[in-house]
Amino acid sequence: MKTERVFTCLFVIAYVMKFLHLAEAGLFMLLVTTILSALYLLGGFYFFSDESIKRQNLPFSIVAGICLAFAPQAILQKVQYWPDAQLYLVISIVVCLAIFVVAYILKRKTKEELKTYYRNMLYRSGVLLGLSTILCIIPISALVHWQYWDNKEFADIATKFYSHPENASFKKEYNDYRATHTPTGKPLKADMLKK
C-alpha cells in the first residue's frame, strides 16, 4: 500500500506540473504509471501479499495484478488526451469492478488471516475503480480547460483537436497555434520562431 501512495503522490505531482505547463510533465506521468502498471502486472503475487507471500490467494493475486495493471494506463490515456481513452476507461471500470466484487465475496467467505489481504485488495480496486469512473464521466473539454485555465483560446483549439484528432483542419489549427505561442498564450518571439 505504501508503494501505491508514493506513486499516487508522484502522479499528482506530474499532473500539477502539467497544469502549470512545466516541461516533461507528460513524460513523468508516463514513467510513473508505467512503473505502477509493471509492478501490478509482473509482481502482483508479491505486491498484493499481506506481510508474507503465503498469506494471500495466489491465483487471485496474479489475476488481479494482470487486470489492475490496465487501470493506471487507462487513466494516463485520459489525462494525456490520447485517442480511445474513453474505451480504455470503460474496460478499466469493468475490470476493476469485477476484481472489487470478487474480492468482496471472497472476503466474506475467508478465514480471519486473509481478511486484511482482501480488505487491501478491495481498497486498491476501489480506488482505481473510482478514479476510472470519475475520469470517464468528466468530458475531455473540461480537462483541457482545466489544464489551459490561463489560455481560453488555446483551450478551445485543443478541445476541438483532442475531440476530433482525425480532422485535418483542427489538427492544422492546433499545430499552427502551438508553433507560434507558448502554452500560456504568449506569442513566441521572432527569433524563437526561426529555430
Image (cartoon, grey):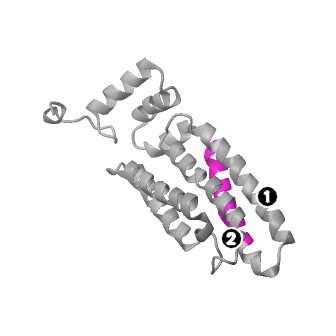
- Tell me if I can see residue 138 in this picture: no
How many neighbours does mark 1 have within 10 angstroms: few (below 14), some (14-19), or many (20 or more)? some
Residue 63: image location, x then y, percent: 68, 57
Residue in the picture at 47% in, 43% down: 80
Residue bearing the label numbered 1: 101
Q: Position of residue 182 (x, y in %)?
A: 29, 39
**Amino acid carrying mark 2 in the image:** Asn
Q: Are marks 1 and 2 in contact (CB under 8 Å)?
A: no
Label 1, secondary structure: give it: helix
Question: Which quadrant is the C terminus positioned in?
Answer: top left
Seen in the image, is 173 located left or right of residue 186? right
Query: What segment is highlighted magenta in the picture?
Result: 118-139
Asked whether, in this view, residue 75 is left or right of residue 105, the answer is left
Q: Nearer the viewer, residue 185 or 144?
A: 144
Give the CA separation, mark 1 to mark 2. 13 Å
Q: Say which residue appears at 58% left-offset and 69% top-offset.
A: 47
Q: Is residue 142 visible?
A: yes
- Which mark is first along the chain, 2 or 1? 1
Q: Nearer the viewer, residue 8 or 137?
A: 8
Vertical placement of residue 83 versus 35, above or below: above
- Helix, strand or loop at mark 2: helix
Question: What residue occupies the far left of the structure in this picture?
Answer: 191
Picture coordinates of residue 173, whole percent (x, y)? 37, 23
Q: Position of residue 161 (x, y in %)?
A: 46, 28
Whether residue 128 appears in magenta in the rendering, the answer is yes
Q: Amino acid at mark 1?
A: Val
Which residue is labeled 2 in the image?
A: 120
